[in-house]
Image: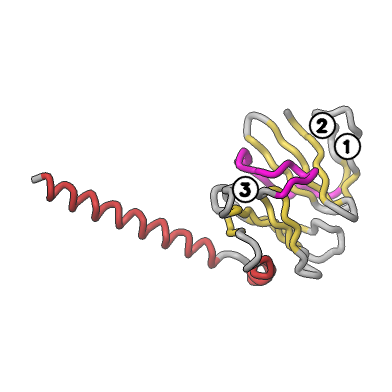
Amino acid sequence: MDIKILLVLSALASCVMAQEADKQWVQEQSIPPVVRVALQQLKPDSAYVCSFHVNPFYLRGDFDGDSIADYAVLIKNTINGKIGLAVVSGQSNRVEVLGAGTLGKAGGDDFHWMDAWYVYPRGKVEHGATELPPPELKADALMVEKLESASGIIYWTGEKYEWYQQGD
């Protein structure tokens, strides 16, 4: 009797794992071709894979202000498990990695806390949870959030991505 239970549990576990693999494959097929090519440029030197823990897992906007669509994609560093963003320039296919174990001013080295994000339109930004004056956005930005907790805006300065604490 115990062997039958083990066989049934083993079969169920196999089905669940197969469904997860199928789900990930389907999500990977939703990655825009320009993003796929740009992320492949990071390999084999990197250990970044797309992360699907937040929906949507990628956003489209003009993040560098050149009037050409750019993409921001959730990524995971497979070496340290840290979550981050890869911002792909639509014009040059240049990839900026934010977080995912990379220390910088745009949100720290791990975005595991983030559970929502969206494109924040260019223009004026409301005063946030800091004494610093809000930036004037010359391009679309990324609003990243921990719902019911904190949020920040990641924006392009013309040279690099910066963080502005929006809510706390």
Mark 3 → mark 2, Cα distance in angstroms? 24 Å
Residue pictured at 60% horizontal, 59% vertical: 47
- Pick whichever of labels 3 and 2 is earlier in the sequence: 3
Tell me the element at label 3: strand
Tell me the element at label 1: loop
Main SS of residues in magenta = loop
Q: Which residue is mark 3?
A: 83
Mark 1 → mark 2, Cα distance in angstroms? 7 Å
* The magenta segment: 102-122
Q: Give neighbour class at mark 2: few <14, some 14-19, many 20+ (Cα, 10 Å).
A: some
Q: Is residue 113 magenta?
A: yes
Place of residue 43 in the rendered image (x, y in percent of width and height, measured from the top left): 64, 67
Mark 3 → mark 1, Cα distance in angstroms? 26 Å
Tell me the element at label 2: loop
Q: Is residue 141 magenta?
A: no
Viewer-nearest residue: 66 or 42: 42
Which scheme is used to colour this image of the protein? Answer: secondary structure
Place of residue 165 in the rendered image (x, y in percent of width and height, measured from the top left): 79, 35
Residue at the outermost left position: 1
* Residue type, numbered disc 3: Ile
* Residue type, numbered disc 1: Pro
Place of residue 77 in the rendered image (x, y in percent of width and height, measured from the top left): 60, 53
For residue 153, above or below residue 44 = above
Q: Which residue is mark 1?
A: 134
Say if residue 69 shows up in the picture. Answer: no
Residue 26's disc number? none
Q: Give neighbour class at mark 1: few <14, some 14-19, many 20+ (Cα, 10 Å).
A: some
Q: Which residue is mark 2?
A: 128
- In the displayed structure image, the side of residue 134 where residue 58 appears, left or right: left
For residue 155, above or below residue 89 = above
**Quadrant containing the N terminus in the rendered view:** top left
